[in-house]
Amino acid sequence: MELSTRASLRDAVRTAGESLTDAATGTPRWLVISAALLLAQAVLPGAQVVLLERVVEMLSEGRTSWAPLLGLTAVVGLMYPLGQVALAATQRMALRLRLQYRTELAYAAARLPPSRLARPDVTTDLEASQNATTAMDGVAGRTLQVLGAAVTAVVLCAVVWQINPLSGLLVAAALVPTVLAFTAIARMEARGWPDVAAADRRAAYATEQLVQQRSGTELAVLGSGRKVAALVGLRRGAATTVLDRMVGKAMLWELAAALATAVLFGAALVALVAGGASGAGAAAAVAGTISGLNAIRLCGYAFGTIITAAPQARIYRRFVASVPASVPQTVVRDVGSVCLENVGFSYPGADQEALRGVSIRAERGEMIALVGVNGAGKTTAVNVLVGMLTPSSGRVLIDGRDAAVLSESERLGHFGLLVQEFGKFEFSLREVVGLGAPGPVDDDGVRRALVSAEAETFTRRLADGLSSQLGQQWGGTGVSGGQWQRLALARIYLRAAGIWILDEPTSAIDAEAEREIFTELRRTRHERITIVVSHRAWTLREMDRIYVLDDGVVVQQGRYEQLLGVRDGRFARIFAGQARGDD
Ligand SMILES: Nc1ncnc2c1ncn2[C@@H]1O[C@H](COP(=O)(O)OP(=O)(O)OP(=O)(O)O)[C@@H](O)[C@H]1O
């Protein structure tokens, strides 16, 4: 046997075993019901042969006995409904397994630390694992079907063997072409599906642009929605071509298998006749084998599905196992000091360091600012501080202790980080603000955070209070860019960590609310360390210290007036115009 075929068979067997284990732990009731129904269904063709032989013998001998007649009626009557009920039971098991896998994956994704989330290979694995759940949910049911078909084949083989041993063997052998054909089809599909999925993903992305409120409106205003619709047609067309080819090849394999099965079946009949079987035996064997072959045919399909699912299941299980166990984050409220000490950092492949010898310090109660033109290194400094980037030289100290000794989760617990690309989570207002803290939050805490973030005025008008759904696509309230930013700031208030890092916290907010937000930040500053990244001169006036970054280096530091006083200094050159405007 070819090595890769052997490997994929081994993988399929392992995947089947793992899926049955998942079903046994996650949905034992439906596993037992499905197994019992499929087992009952599996023995029916064998029972049919035995009972039919008795009935024909009885009739030819002119006797009348109700037992075999009733038995045969029950067997024939049960065959179809039992199959349907067994199918429904395996579907219910599949639904529960899908829920189990998707929930497990969501929790695994939630445990990913920011440093891993930033890696493209992790995002790809996460997406592949998400797709895998659809293929994996049916594996346990398919495994039961394969086992049921094996039982059918063994029982049929045994009862036909009683009539004619060679026929019995040939009936069992009739299973082989179907299994081989479907294995080949599954392997071919496994190769073709990535192309179909890639084209489908692109088509889905283009469709989303047409459907989503913001992008859809922009396209409608531009009158260019048809161009995007054409892209959808193109991508779906590409997927259909690949699918079409796959279905064509599958038809050929199925046809070949059907022919081989017919030949083996014919040979079984010849063996019966040549072996001098009685009329009753021959009739019973033929009828039973026909019903049995139908059941066995399904086995090929089921087996093929398991083979297709196996590589995807491997990706899923590898990904879930690779995510570290959950360590509940604890928010650290009391931090005395934080500093970057002579920090250097280079992005992979960059020809120049993004940070060079950067030293920044801040103490409890202080408000400091990082300023500089685009690309100066402010975001890089922030990411080194919170631990998303590891410095190539120097260190980060929190309360005098090297932060490198902390786990990523412990370290993140010290910070409340408001980034420029803050989340616009379209959940209920309570949930949107409650996401600020890892644990449970009470409504009073949510309301206080809304007040501090100047978000109370617009949220007070919402009909359902804290339960109001945000986001028009869910039938909820539309929220403006500035309002979203206030909600993001409310999360930071609710979190109340020891170190706040606010990257342009009021970039989308009007001037009046901005002043109120900064007044509140100053009022509450004593409880924490506040680090602000800002391009607005007036927000810098009351900072305890401003660090001016230029090309990855701290070129100036001091208070606002002091820095502005250095006429040809970097700060004065960036902010002099704005400062005059303020005055
Ligand atoms: N992921 C990255 N890979 C490579 N280089 C990067 C990456 N992120 C940032 N840089 C580079 O590092 C330098 C500092 O970027 P950084 O984002 O820290 O600047 P910034 O001061 O925050 O700018 P802005 O005001 O535009 O937000 C820039 O030259 C930028 O091009």
Image (tube, rainbow, N blue to C red):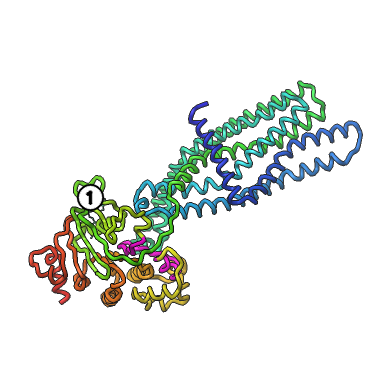
Q: Nearer the viewer, residue 206 or 41?
A: 41
Up-down relation of residue 242 to residue 477 (above or below): above
Q: Nearer the viewer, residue 290 or 484?
A: 484
- Ligand 1's quadrant is bottom left
Q: Quadrant of the C terminus?
A: bottom left
| Residue 550, horizontal then vertical, whole percent | 16, 58
**Side of 114 where 430 appears, left or right:** right
In terms of image quadrants, where is residue 220? Answer: bottom left
Residue 480 visible from this viewpoint: no
Residue found at x 82% / y 26%: 278
**Side of 333 where 376 appears, left or right:** left
Residue at the farthest left position: 568
Q: Which residue is mark 1?
A: 393
| Residue 307, horizontal then vertical, whole percent | 53, 38
Q: Nearer the viewer, residue 337 or 445?
A: 337
Magenta stretch containing residue 417, yes or no?
yes
Q: Which residues are magenta?
A: 413-436
| Residue 392, horizontal then vertical, whole percent | 24, 49
Residue found at x 38% / y 73%: 449
